[in-house]
Image (cartoon, helix red, strand yellow):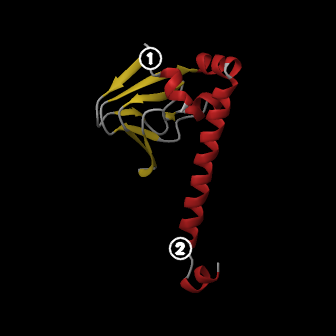
Amino acid sequence: MLFFDMFRHDPKFIAIKGGEVLFREGDAGEAMYVLIEGEAEVTIAGMFFEKCAPGSFVGELAVIDDSPRSATVTALKDCRFVVINRERFQFLVDEAPRFAIDVMRVMAQRLRNCDRRILAAGLSEMPVDMASSA
């Protein structure tokens, strides 16, 4: 993935131990993060959402729209994350359009996954006779 190649040798990173939280749902967000080493998980309202491997990024929504964090990210193993603050994010969008396309592609994939989960949850809550005809 482009993210891993762009950032794997970046000297500006933060390290967190397995079990530690990178950020929590509701926190203010001033940066996104690219996982360059380790494994982490994303939870929303305490429910598992996504597992992150090297090359994954998290926290992009808060950087894009200045909103509070919509999820919690916890290291499953010791991790290293490259920090991309708003200014660097804007620079990358301006100077490396492929970066912006890749961010949008991952956001679209996450949105589709959310849609599928909502649909599956809705179908599982339907009475049996309605779910079989859906």
Picture layout, residue 92 above or below residue 102: above
User: Which of 127/9 is in front?
Assistant: 9
Q: Quadrant of residue 128?
A: bottom right
Check the image and report above or below for 84 versus 17: above
Q: Identify the residue at horizontal 59%, vertical 40% (top origin).
A: 106
Which residue matches tag 1?
9
Q: Position of residue 91 (x, y in %)?
A: 65, 16
Disc 1: CA contacts within 10 A as few (<14), some (14-19) or many (>=20)? few
**On the image, which quarter does residue 76 sit in?**
top left
Most foreground residue, 112 or 59: 112
Residue 20, percent from left and from top:
31, 34
Name of the residue lying farthest toward the top? 11
100 lies left or right of 117: right
The correct choice, above or below, for 45 with respect to 55 in the image is: below
Looking at marks 2 and 1 on the same chain, the residue that comes earlier in the sequence is marked by 1
Q: CA distance from mark 2 to mark 1?
A: 47 Å
Please report the residue visible at 41 percent of the width from the left and 50 percent of the height from the top. Answer: 46
Q: Disc number at residue 125?
A: 2
Mark 2 is on which residue type?
A: Glu
